[in-house]
Image (spheres, rainbow, N blue to C red):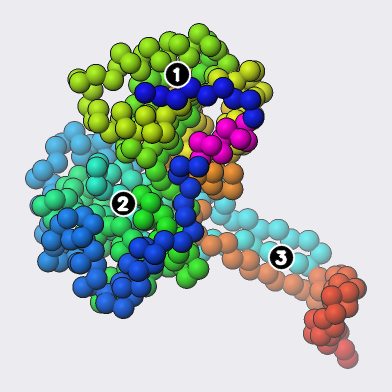
Amino acid sequence: MIKKIIVKNAVKEANLIRRSNRIPQKSEIVEKIISNVIKFGDSAILKYTKKYDNVKIDSITVDKAELKKAYKEVTANQLNSLKKSKKLLEKNEKMLLKRLTGIVSSENGVTIERALKPIESVGCYVPGGRARYPSTLMMCVVPAIIAGVNRISVVSPPMKDGRIDPVTLVAADICGIDEVYRIGGAQAVAALAYGTRTIKKVDKIVGPGGLFVNIAKFLVSNKIGIDMIAGPTELLIYADSRSDPRYVVKDLISQAEHSPDTICGVVTTSESLVKKLVNEIKNTLNSSLSRLEIVSASLRKNGFIALCKNEDDGISFINELAPEHLEVISENPGRIASKINTAGIVLLGKYSPSSASDYCLGSNHVLPTIEFGKSKSSLSVLDFVKLVNHITVTKMGLQSVQKYIKELAFAEGLPNHYYAVEERFRN
């Protein structure tokens, strides 16, 4: 049902877990999809939508009438929840942007202003398929809006009836987005990267996706910017002997229901907890559980409980695995969390489940996966701005560094760098 691992070597055990979800650097299928979208444009997109989504659509574009019509299928409570999530996310993104605005340094006649400039256009990939993700739309779109991005395009796979989920469309509307396309997969990434007759190319693509989407993002990243490799979902829970096994198992299931490719695991030093967790999983996985087939497949394929000799080994294992979500449900979660450097998000205490951060805590749930937490952080307003240096130098300021420029320019064999400076002091 779920693997039990005795961790003797953190690197080795983490690599064994990772082996099944590496993103291949090449894929003939994805390369062909991208190539055909470049060559045939919209017709290739329609063809691949029918082939991979099993949906025949006549129009790629979602018009304003369809956006407005979606409101009839959304409840008042759903609408209020979308607005609450949006408000919390906006607050945190604005705070971050404010901290980075107005940074000026000045010394000896040299003034540097760090100016933030928004990216001109962005494409947001919102997954579909086995579930619907209006929350992901907001996680991608809101930071872009706060950053001041001029044009935001949203792509999302259609449902079986050819429409996009109404709650997702309403989320787009309350964010002020009216450029929405009913396409997904590698073909959507290719369309955003290269453009078609209907879809105008963008400067950067953000958002999580499945295998084909991530391979496509990797392949187009030599042409345009991407945020990170995000998806499938990962959850690791650090728990001790005092942790409630019910909370731990419920949290595992909450992420396992995304897809059979989800990685969900527990790391602990308590043998007694391992036994309790195994029993709790057996008791919980019954016919009354929603999305049982997906949850069972996920835990069977990628679920694990890692037993470590001591706390230090557990922390080493976590840092090596670099999980997307890390929950610390222990007696002193702050002490454990302070030693974690690689997780995409760290949730401390039993009242901070990853499922809450997916929706309505004000944090962003587009997070690095597949070890990218070692070098990447969650999606934020920072992904939608460029830092441009505005530099003003006085005559005295340039003179104060003239001799250093000379030494470095000649050391590098680039004397004309220095002569350009020297010329300004000739009589």
Quadrant holding the N terminus: top left
Based on the displayed image, in which of its 4 quarters is residue 365 positioned? top left
Residue 133 x %, y %: 28, 44
Distance from label 1 to label 2 (Cα)? 29 Å
Q: Nearer the viewer, residue 87 or 144?
A: 144
Distance from label 1 to label 3 (Cα)? 48 Å
Residue 387 x %, y %: 57, 61
Q: For the point 39% across and 43% down, which residue is it? A: 232
Q: Main secondary structure of the magenta part?
A: helix
Mark 2 residue type: Val
Q: Give the left or right position of residue 127, taking residue 74 as reference.
A: right
Q: Nearer the viewer, residue 32 or 414?
A: 32
The 10 Å Cα crowd at callout 2, few under 14, some 14 to 19, many 20 or more, is many
**Residue 350 badge:** 1
Mark 1 or mark 2: whose residue is earlier in sequence: 2
**Helix, strand or loop at mark 2:** loop
Residue named by callout 3: 111
Distance from label 3 to label 2 (Cα)? 42 Å
Q: Give the left or right position of residue 45, taking residue 12 as reference.
A: left
Task: Give the residues in magenta.
Answer: 10-18
Q: For the point 21% across and 55% down, which residue is it? A: 53
Mark 3 or mark 2: whose residue is earlier in sequence: 3
Residue named by callout 2: 126
Nearer to us of marks 1 and 3 is 1
Residue 152 seen in the figure: no
